[in-house]
Image: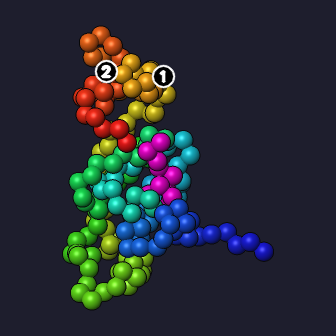
């Protein structure tokens, strides 16, 4: 008999390991679902803005279904455990910020596993400062054509292409950065 995995187990599997950062994102997703309703995104109905690029963002992707590829997850790396999550269907949005007075920098002598368990066992209403906010929903993702860079030969999305001496180039070639991953 195959047991379906819990949302936490799915998040751990997606991320690759269990950790305090993942637990923060998991609980932030739980807080969002309390306000917006128990719906996982299918086609850009839920939009998330994460103000960090930590492990927490993987839980947002796993639990809420918001991804950079679908265009309904935006990263603004301000180094803050803050997430603004909105529902196009209801028109509501909520800003969820980790309560520093509750979590702070952790407890002295606390292991990563102990911190993770403390996060997972803390009620979301105590763990986060949550407030409804006005939210300008971004436009839904648009598929644009790709153009060929005349210098490096790689494809570049039309909206990111540049003109350099009358020729179509990608941002790297426009800047002559020499950067080639």
Q: Give the total of numbered labels.
A: 2
Q: Is residue 51 left or right of residue 2?
A: left
Tell me the crowding category of disc 2: few under 14, some 14 to 19, or many 20 or more residues within 10 angstroms, Cα based.
some
- Specify the quadrant that holds the N terminus: bottom right
x then y, percent, for residue 17: 48, 71
**Residue at image mark 2:** 162
Quarter of image, res 150: top left
**Label 2 element class:** strand
SS label for mark 1? loop
Per the image, the residue denoted by label 1 is 145
Point 25% across, 60% down: residue = 80
Q: Position of residue 10 (x, y in %)?
A: 56, 65
How many C-alpha atoms fall within 10 Å of the one at disc 1: few (<14), some, or many (≥20)? Answer: few
| Residue at 42%, 67% in the rendered image | 22
**The magenta segment:** 60-69
Q: Quadrant of residue 128?
A: bottom left
Nearest the camera: 132 or 79?
A: 79
* Residue 148 image point, x, y percent: 44, 21
Q: Measure how far apart labels 1 and 2 are at the Cα level.
A: 14 Å
122 relative to 36, above or below: below
Would you say residue 80 is visible in this rendering?
Answer: yes
Q: Is residue 167 above or below residue 48?
A: above
Sequence-wise, which precedes: disc 1 or disc 2? 1
Q: Residue at x 49, y 28 (%)?
A: 143
Left or right side of 26 for 110:
left
Which residue is at 22% across, 71% downward? Answer: 100
């Amino acid at each position: 008999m195959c047991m379906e995995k819990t949302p936490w187990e799915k998040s751990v599997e997606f991320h690759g390991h269990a950790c305090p950062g993942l637990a923060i994102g998991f609980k932030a997703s739980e807080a969002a679902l309390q306000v917006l309703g128990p719906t996982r995104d299918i086609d850009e109905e839920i939009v998330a803005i994460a103000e960090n690029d930590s492990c927490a963002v993987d839980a947002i992707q796993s639990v809420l279904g918001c991804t950079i590829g679908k265009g309904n997850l935006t990263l603004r790396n301000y180094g803050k455990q803050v997430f603004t999550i909105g529902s196009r269907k209801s028109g509501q949005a909520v800003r969820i910020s980790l309560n520093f007075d509750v979590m702070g920098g952790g407890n002295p002598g606390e292991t990563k596993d102990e911190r993770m368990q403390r996060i997972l066992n803390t009620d979301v209403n105590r763990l986060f400062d949550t407030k409804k906010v006005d939210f300008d929903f971004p436009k839904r993702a648009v598929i644009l054509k790709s153009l060929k860079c005349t210098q490096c030969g790689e494809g570049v999305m039309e909206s990111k292409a540049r003109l350099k001496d009358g020729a179509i180039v990608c941002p790297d070639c426009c800047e002559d950065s020499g950067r080639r991953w």
